[in-house]
Amino acid sequence: MIFAAGLGTRLRPITDTVPKALVPVNGKPLLHHLLVKLQQAGCSYVVINVHHLAHLIKEYIATHDYGMHIVISDESEQLLDTGGGLRHAAPLFRGDEPILVHNADILSNIDLKQLLAAHTPDRLATVVTSERESSRYLFFDENNLLKGWCNTKSGELKPCNLDVTRLRKSAFAGIHVVSPHIFTLMQPQPDKFSIINFYLDMMDSHSIASYTPHNFAMLDVGKIDSLAAAEQFISTL
């Protein structure tokens, strides 16, 4: 599943008329680069959620062939956040295979096949993390299991009594693999909710593990000043 529903406010004024997923990098939309990566990894079925300027993404998918069956999860009426967006798309998924979830605005050198191989059936989720500077971090124990979260700007800590002295902090990379069992656990949640907050609620009863590939490099194309860096980053992949 590709998360492409966001408003892209940090990329304004470009995203006033172009959805973030269609912002061009090296002459091709971000969505194109990700779809090619998914196709090369062996994906045959992709769900894309849409909200902001949804019609433009629908038109793009209808007029481009990536050799995969691509379906739209429409959130035009209400933006549902990452957790709500995933649950809203649940009826579109087939079978009981793990689901790869990828933000549309993330570029990386990750080997998606290796990521999927690293996800084990006992886990609720495997989250890709990066050792980079960020205002928000996830905390993991010696077994790479999720134990908490913090916002370095606000000082907020979840859980509030978390002892971080023996924990490793790492930044979420916007890429994760989830068990299809996640949809059952999500049923009590409100329509709109964050996947990270959901993971924090589930971490004491379910395994949510970190995965950081060797020599992992990524770029969050979320701001205007990141577009030039994205052009250079794409050329190295």
Image: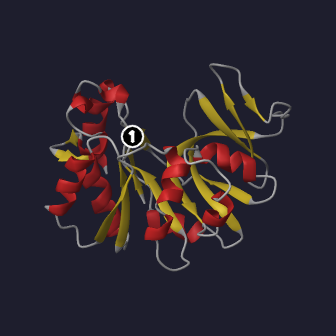
Specify few, some or many for label 1: CA neighbours under 10 Å numbering under 14, 14-19, or 20 or more.
many
Place of residue 103 in the rendered image (x, y in percent of width and height, measured from the top left): 42, 48
- Position of residue 22 relative to residue 153, above or below, is below
Most foreground residue, 98 or 127: 98
The quadrant in which the N terminus is found is bottom left
Residue 50 at x, y percent in the picture: 34, 50
In the picture, measured across the screen, residue 123 lies left or right of residue 89, that is right
> Quick check: can you spot residue 215?
no
Q: Nearer the viewer, residue 231 or 12?
A: 12
Residue nearer the viewer, 89 or 104: 89
Q: Where is residue 137 shown, x and y percent of the image?
A: 64, 35
The residue drawn where x is 72% and y is 70% is 122
Report how many numbered discs are placed on residues in the image: 1
Looking at the rendering, which quadrant does residue 205 occupy? bottom right
Q: Residue at x 61, y 67 (%)?
A: 179
Tag 1: residue type? Gly
Q: Residue furthest front?
A: 77
> Is 142 on the left-hand or right-hand side of 55?
right
Q: Which residue is mark 1?
A: 6
Question: Callout 1: helix, strand or loop?
Answer: loop
The picture quadrant where one finds residue 9 is top left
The residue positioned 30% from the left and 60% from the top of the image is 35
How is the model colour-coded? secondary structure
- Residue located farthest toward the bottom when viewing the structure as drawn: 95
Residue at the image point whose x is 81% and y is 30% from the top: 160
Residue 44's x, y, as percent?
Answer: 34, 75
Does 194 sit left or right of 34 as displayed? right
Q: Is residue 56 above or below residue 219?
A: below
In this rendering, does residue 125 appear at all? yes
